[in-house]
Image (cartoon, rainbow, N blue to C red):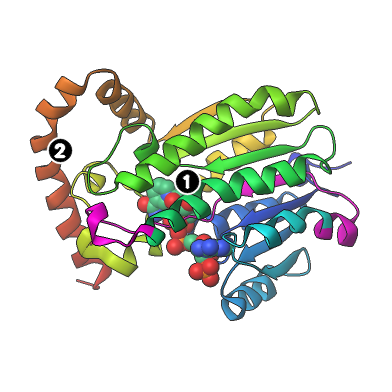
Amino acid sequence: MVGPAMDLLERVAIVTGASSGIGLAVSRMLIAGGARVVLVARGAERLESVAMALGAQATAWALDVGDLEALARLPAEVHARFGRLDIVVNNAGLHHRGDMLRHSPLELAEMVRVNLSAPIVLTRAAAELMSSGGVVVNVASLAGKLGVPGSAVYSGTKAGLRFWGLAAAEDLARRGLRIANVNPGPVDTGFFDADFEHVTDLTFSQPMCSSEQVAAMVMDCVRSQETGLDRDIPYLSGKLSTLGYLSPGLARLLRPALERRGAANKRKFLVRKSGG
Ligand SMILES: NC(=O)c1ccc[n+]([C@@H]2O[C@H](COP(=O)([O-])OP(=O)(O)OC[C@H]3O[C@@H](n4cnc5c(N)ncnc54)[C@H](OP(=O)(O)O)[C@@H]3O)[C@@H](O)[C@H]2O)c1
């Protein structure tokens, strides 16, 4: 008999952004559940070594999700190779931080392509081929629930991702497929490394999660029988974001105190990262 831990035996999954952080943790948990996982990321070398470490159920598939034509072909290629497709985790993301005027028009458009167009294209192409009972999980952000100044375009893409996911639930349900959003606050990954000085204090005002905590929530969505889930992590930070969205006056009032707390958390994070 198959135990509950191996309930994903025979399932085939695609995870984008799978070579580090949340995507790697999700891939590890899918594999622990018995699934075969196609790991997508751009850097082939890191991807190969991650796939090697994960073992025979992992397949490295080097691809830039911003290459929408190649991405649209991916589900058919995976289906041809493994004979089925059951799970898609839209996790790869891009954040050009700070005032949007710091970035060129095309850099801003690139964020829309990677964070929003790519999940739509991949899901649309996959939906034709996924087995009934299949599921799509989007890794969005709390920044997609409450606009974060200093992350304007990123916030817009993550809000778009969430709303598309919620609205697409009906279309996908007609094919027997489910979709869910997971909306994390700050997560302790390499996502901040490229441009730490432009991470907003507001971002750090919320408790930081681990990749594993976010991945566990993604797995709950994979295993749930429900569609249209929109899960926040941490839960209370999600509630605070909703309150701020519904009451912009209250959000303005709370912002200075949250930014003070965030600045202090950011200093502690830096000390911890530098081994202090
Ligand atoms: N960390 C946070 O605080 C946080 C909070 C809320 C939401 N999120 C969201 O969580 C998701 C994962 O972030 P993370 O924190 O786990 O980041 P991470 O540790 O930096 O990992 C990002 C992964 O995505 C891959 N990737 C990046 N751009 C790609 C592209 N164009 N095509 C294919 N793969 C790509 C990276 O590999 P390559 O560079 O080799 O391509 C890597 O495997 C993102 O969507 C992010 O917006 C993160």
Q: What percent of the width, then of the height, locates residue 138?
A: 56, 42
Whether residue 276 is visible here, answered yes or no, is: yes
Residue that numbered label 2 is attached to: 258
Please name the amino acid that badge 2 sits on. Answer: Leu
Q: Is residue 132 left or right of residue 20?
A: right
Give the total number of marks visible in the rendering.
Answer: 2
Q: Nearer the viewer, residue 258 or 40?
A: 40
What are the residue bounds of the magenta stretch?
77-105
Residue 208 inside the magenta-drawn segment: no
Nearer the camera: disc 2 or disc 1: 2
Q: What percent of the width, then of the height, locates residue 224?
A: 66, 29
State which quarter of the image contains the N terminus.
top right
Picture residue at 51% right of the left edge, 55% below the top: 114
Picture residue at 87% right of the left edge, 49% below the top: 84
Examine the image and state in which quarter residue 101 appears: bottom left
Picture residue at 80% right of the left edge, 32% below the top: 133
Q: What percent of the width, then of the height, locates residue 52?
A: 69, 75
* Secondary structure beneath label 1: helix
Q: What percent of the width, then of the height, locates residue 75?
A: 78, 53
Examine the image and state in which quarter residue 95 appears: bottom left
Whether residue 141 is visible here, answered yes or no, is: no
Residue 92 inside the magenta-drawn segment: yes
Crowdedness near tag 2: few (<14), some (14–19) or many (≥20) residues, C-alpha within 10 Å: some
Q: How much space separates mark 2 and mark 1, taking CA atoms?
A: 23 Å
Crowdedness near tag 1: few (<14), some (14–19) or many (≥20) residues, C-alpha within 10 Å: some
Cβ atoms at labels 2 and 1 below 8 Å apart? no
Residue that numbered label 1 is attached to: 213
Q: Nearer the viewer, residue 14 or 75?
A: 75
* Secondary structure beneath label 2: helix
N-terminal of the two: label 2 or label 1?
A: 1
